[in-house]
Amino acid sequence: MISVQDLIRKKRNGRVLNREEIEYLVRGISSGEIPDYQISAWAMAVFFQGMDERETRDLAVAMANSGDVADLSSVQGVTVDKHSTGGVGDKTTLVVIPLVAAAGIPVAKMSGRGLGHTGGTIDKFESIPGMKVEKEFTDFIDQVNSVKAAVISQTGNLVPADKRLYAIRDVTATVDSIPLIASSIMSKKLASGAEGIVLDVKVGSGAFMKSREQALQLAEIMVAIGKGAGRQVVAVLTDMSQPLGFKIGNSLEVIEAIDLLAGGGPADLLEISLELAARMMVLGEKFDQVEEARDYAAELLNSGKALDKFTEMITAQGGSLQLNRADRGLRMAAIQQPVQSEISGYVNRLDAYEVGHAAMSLGAGREQVNDKIDHAAGIELLKKRGDYVQAGEKIAVIHASQEKHLGNAEAGIKAAYEIGPAKPESTPLILDIVT
Ligand code: URA
């Protein structure tokens, strides 16, 4: 007879749980038979003692099988997926889905909503007027076969064990544990069914992983979990010390993603999007070499084919865009207030966490899972690391629906910028690849 307190004690004492014990825990988490206090005690024991690779893999697989598992076998072609561990201004999914689909590779994307200072892909898509992200599974598969791309919100019964465990971790200071993050993310990826998975592991102040060493550890264990479950997985470590692109907030990020798809857009977003898309194209068996795939992805952007695919996917899901307008037909905030620098100098640091937090305080993100999002709220950055600023010059613009939010957001943005006399050295955006 397995007892939960024995499992907690075993983990607390630094021992390794076997597969049967992990499966017992996961069953009790999904069924509700194990109470919150025992789950949180076990999670805290894992936080301090860690889990070995086999244990982490067993936890991911048991959680993946705790609810519905998407069957993508009726999709024509090799299905690929991507996942970001979460960042600020990270709209790469919006670019990469149509880019890979335009290459003829099916992308069946199940995404989540944002929580805390990082944004969620579903919230971004929902800022497009009319866009529906809830679909019957058979309609979802039909769209993947006809358009090559579809995006839906994760269904209620996908990985119920992770849903409950994550909610408990969120309030017991046990989110930032590498084996728990790895098993949580990979359980969702395994249950989402794609054969090839590209992971964008963010590193820096705006990410869960603050250092490259931690991120590398997370990437390696996630790749091992995926491979152990028979999937092709590549992890790309990318910089999240400052936000990606210039725009943060749901409508603003869709606009910036469309700018990139239309052949413009910021250089950092372009570099990371091309890398992720190229890796997906290789896993989707369209190319053998990443370099070739990257060139092809750039061609799809320049020719407008990726933008056409984006429009086709949005239209198939009821959304409408006005591509001839600067706001692309999205709702803009009533108030747009500039923030000025008080001193002259070079931007030495632009803290992603601070910017993400300021955007959340404007209503662009959720503090609690049930909070309502203000899709038009956000921040437009005018200066990034390495740029020179004159005293009195605008460094950012706050997009707000309510005056009362302006003060906190301005203070947050000012705290995010560190301006000094010397120009900082430029740092790479792509830090490592784990295959
Ligand atoms: N994202 C997840 O899905 N799970 C975690 O534990 C952390 C980030």
Image: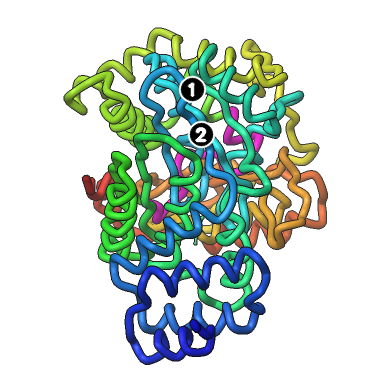
Q: Which residue is under mark 2? A: 71
Screen quadrant of the C terminus: top left
Q: Nearer the viewer, residue 63 or 364?
A: 63
Q: Is the C-beta of the residue carrying label 1 under 8 Å from the nearest atom of ligand 1?
A: no
How crowded pointer 1 is (Cα within 10 Å; few <14, some 14-19, many 20+) is rated as few
Magenta span includes 241: yes
Rendering coords of residue 411 (x, y %): 63, 62
Rendering coords of residue 270 (x, y %): 38, 30
- The kind of secondary structure element at disc 2 is loop
Dot 1 and dot 2 residues touching (CB under 8 Å)? yes
Rendering coords of residue 51 (x, y %): 34, 74
Relative placement, left or right, of 133 versus 43 is right
Q: Is the C-beta of the residue carrying label 2 under 8 Å from the nearest atom of ligand 1?
A: no
Q: Which residue is at a point 56% across and 60% down the rendered structure image?
A: 162
Magenta span includes 389: no
Relative placement, left or right, of 248 versus 132 is left
Q: Nearer the viewer, residue 211 or 343?
A: 211
Give amino acid for label 2.
Asp
Rendering coords of residue 28 (x, y %): 59, 71
Q: Which residue is under mark 1? A: 74
Q: Which residue is at a point 28% across and 16% down the rendered structure image?
A: 296
- The kind of secondary structure element at disc 1 is loop
Q: Is residue 395 above or below residue 410?
A: above
- Res. 205 in view: no
Q: Which residue is at a point 30% across and 49% down the rendered structure image?
A: 237
- Res. 321 in view: yes
Which residue range is magenta in the image?
240-255
Relative placement, left or right, of 323 versus 419 is right
Q: Is residue 25 above or below residue 82?
A: below
Give amino acid for label 1.
Ser
